């Protein structure tokens, strides 16, 4: 069913275009992700940031086709460069090829990592399973050795002992590291980490981040980091996508976003985090909350909360407008007439 060859610039691992995801609930259709486009290069860390419910997890889950009913991916493409060099559209390939890629070329650390650990199996067994799922001709002895080495890489003390531990025998920080180790089992090209440090204390957070960063350098992976914590973004991201109500409202290099934010939402986001360890549930400095995605506001979705809203913003949705090289913002204030 594979059609014409697809093109991706050489250093790009993933390119998502015009992604559209909806949930068909009894209350109505939730426009969870609308027209989202982004890319990730080899060895690059891309951060997805935004308030709770703005579509960060749905975006990355959709890319790996992990959207469950009543959700549906309604449009877009997600071109991915496989280890072999072949470029595929993750949204179109068959289930078998998708299985070859997931947990192997793409690793996904879920928002609640402990839920991805089975309490009945040791950490070593989890790694074993992940490896044999993609390499059948490997002995248990070899995978065990690899498991010890992976636990060592994620700086778990006494890995020879820990490899035989069950999830409940580990601290939260160690479980988190174990999940990262499992993710690294098959040397992925792309690592997606959804809030990998939430619920961990600040010191452990910093250690996990250093770890991800150094592993990324060693493995030359692309890393998508989802976080509400702008302190973390500042520390590790190369480029940033700011999401609001299911859309990307601003994108650019870290410095552009932090030192020259253009979208009123980004500006408020940067101002509204006195405590970088707190989850952004609600921006105190602006009234209101993220709108219902069942009936998103007309025009710009941020307009009801925007201190600069003009008449046009209520009528017409702003496209991403170029601020400078690679820096774009979806705001009518940028429109030069
Ligand atoms: N199974 C579902 N059924 C209905 N709506 C859903 C479902 N999953 C997600 N949504 C909706 O999709 C939107 C985006 O949710 P998503 O989980 O991507 O947010 P998020 O940015 O990851 O938030 P958080 O920071 O809280 O993790 C929200 O409006 C959410 O309510
Ligand atoms: Mg989420």
Image: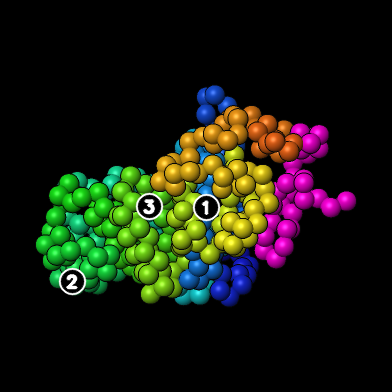
Residue 131: x %, y % from top left: 28, 65
Residue 111: x %, y % from top left: 38, 46
Residue 145: image tag? 2
CB-based contact (under 8 Å), mark 1 and mark 3: no
Whichever of labels 2 and 1 marks the residue nearer the N terminus, that label is 1
Residue 173: x %, y % from top left: 26, 53
- The span from disc 2 to disc 1 (Cα, nearest Å) is 35 Å
Mark 1: secondary structure = strand
- The span from disc 1 to disc 3 (Cα, nearest Å) is 13 Å
Q: Is residue 36 above or below residue 24?
A: below
Mark 3: secondary structure = loop
User: Would residue 145 appear left or right of 58 to someone viewing this image?
Assistant: left
Mark 1 vs ligand 1: CB below 8 Å: yes
Residue at numbered disc 3? 196
- The span from disc 2 to disc 3 (Cα, nearest Å) is 25 Å
Residue at numbered disc 1? 48
Whichever of labels 1 and 3 marks the residue nearer the N terminus, that label is 1
User: Would residue 158 appear left or right of 307 to someone viewing this image?
Assistant: left
Whichever of labels 2 and 3 marks the residue nearer the N terminus, that label is 2
What residue appears at the point 70 percent right and 65 percent down from the top-left corner? 325
- In the image, the segment drawn in magenta is 310-337
Check the image and name the residue furthest to the front: 274
């Amino acid at each position: 069913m594979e059609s014409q060859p697809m093109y991706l610039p050489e250093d790009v691992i993933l390119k998502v275009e015009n992604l559209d995801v909806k949930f068909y609930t009894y209350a109505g259709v939730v426009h969870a992700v609308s027209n989202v486009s982004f890319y990730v290069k080899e060895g690059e860390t891309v951060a997805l940031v935004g308030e709770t419910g703005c579509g960060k997890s749905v975006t990355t889950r959709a890319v790996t086709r992990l959207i469950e009913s009543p959700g549906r991916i309604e449009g877009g493409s997600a071109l991915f460069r496989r280890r072999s060099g072949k470029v595929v559209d993750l949204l179109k390939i068959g289930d078998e090829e998708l299985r070859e890629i997931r947990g192997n070329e793409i690793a996904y650390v879920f928002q609640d990592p402990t839920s991805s650990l089975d309490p009945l199996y040791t950490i070593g067994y989890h790694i074993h399973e992940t490896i044999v799922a993609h390499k059948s001709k490997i002995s248990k002895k070899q995978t065990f050795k690899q498991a010890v080495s992976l636990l060592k890489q994620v700086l778990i003390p006494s890995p020879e002992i820990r490899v035989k531990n069950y999830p409940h025998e580990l601290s939260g920080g160690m479980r988190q590291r174990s999940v990262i180790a499992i993710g690294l089992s098959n040397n992925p090209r792309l690592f997606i980490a959804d809030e990998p440090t939430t619920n961990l204390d600040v010191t452990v957070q910093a250690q996990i981040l250093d770890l991800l960063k150094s592993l990324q350098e060693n493995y030359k992976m692309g890393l998508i980091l989802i976080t509400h914590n702008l302190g973390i973004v500042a520390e590790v991201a190369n480029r940033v996508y700011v999401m609001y109500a299911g859309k990307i409202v601003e994108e650019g290099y870290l410095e552009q976003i932090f030192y020259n934010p253009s979208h009123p939402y980004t500006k408020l986001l940067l101002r509204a985090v006195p405590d970088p360890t707190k989850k952004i549930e609600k921006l105190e400095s602006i009234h209101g909350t993220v709108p219902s995605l069942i009936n998103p506001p007309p025009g710009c979705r941020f307009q009801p909360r925007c201190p600069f809203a003009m008449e046009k913003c209520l009528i017409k949705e702003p496209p991403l407008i170029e601020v400078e090289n690679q820096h774009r913002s979806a705001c009518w204030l940028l429109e030069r007439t």
